[in-house]
Amino acid sequence: MGFFVSYAQFPKILLALAGGLLLGALLGLVGLRLTKFETTEQGHFYTPNTHIGIGLSALLAGRILYRMFFFSIDNPSPNAPQAFQSPLTMFLFGLIAGYYLVYYIGLFVHMHDKK
């Protein structure tokens, strides 16, 4: 909760984070539908869709590398946002957080129902 309070003075960042969480949650539902579940004598198993996980990881890693490069430049633009005040970075963080939150809750519910 303190995380959101600290960004209360930056409404664009909060909107980006909320949009990322919402889109990530929808993507998590898609990921659950694309997950292959299997029940054998050894137990219950699942195989996630690798394209979604790799895509999200690549987006965030690319953004982090870009920001690291940008801040390593001696004279960054004075209009550029500070390290943790970029709406795009917060959107991508929300996207990943929303995806994994919904995905793993869905996995837990699905696997719990199989017991």
Image (cartoon, helix red, strand yellow):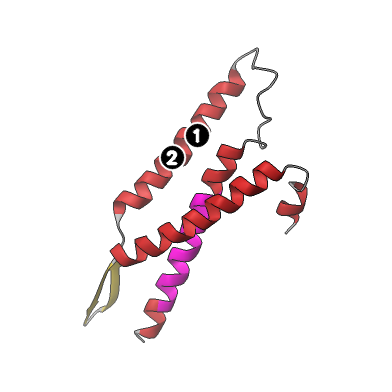
Q: Amino acid at mark 2?
A: Leu
Q: Is 98 contained in the magenta span? A: yes
Q: Amino acid at mark 1?
A: Arg
Q: Are marks 2 and 1 in contact (CB under 8 Å)?
A: yes
Residue 66: % across, % down: 51, 27
Instruction: Give the quarter of the figure containing the N terminus.
Output: bottom right
Residue 29: % across, % down: 40, 64
Residue 5 tag number = none
Which residue in the structure is indicated by mark 2?
59
Q: Is residue 77 left or right of residue 6?
A: left
Q: Is 33 contained in the magenta span? A: no
Which residue appears farthest toward the left when viewing the image? 40
Q: Is residue 68 left or right of residue 42?
A: right
Vertical order, 115 against 109 (above or below): below
Instruction: Give the quarter of the figure containing the C terminus.
Output: bottom left
Q: Nearer the viewer, residue 24 or 56?
A: 24
Which residue appears farthest toward the top when viewing the image? 75
Q: Which residues are magenta?
A: 94-109
Residue 22: % across, % down: 52, 57
Residue 63 tag number = 1
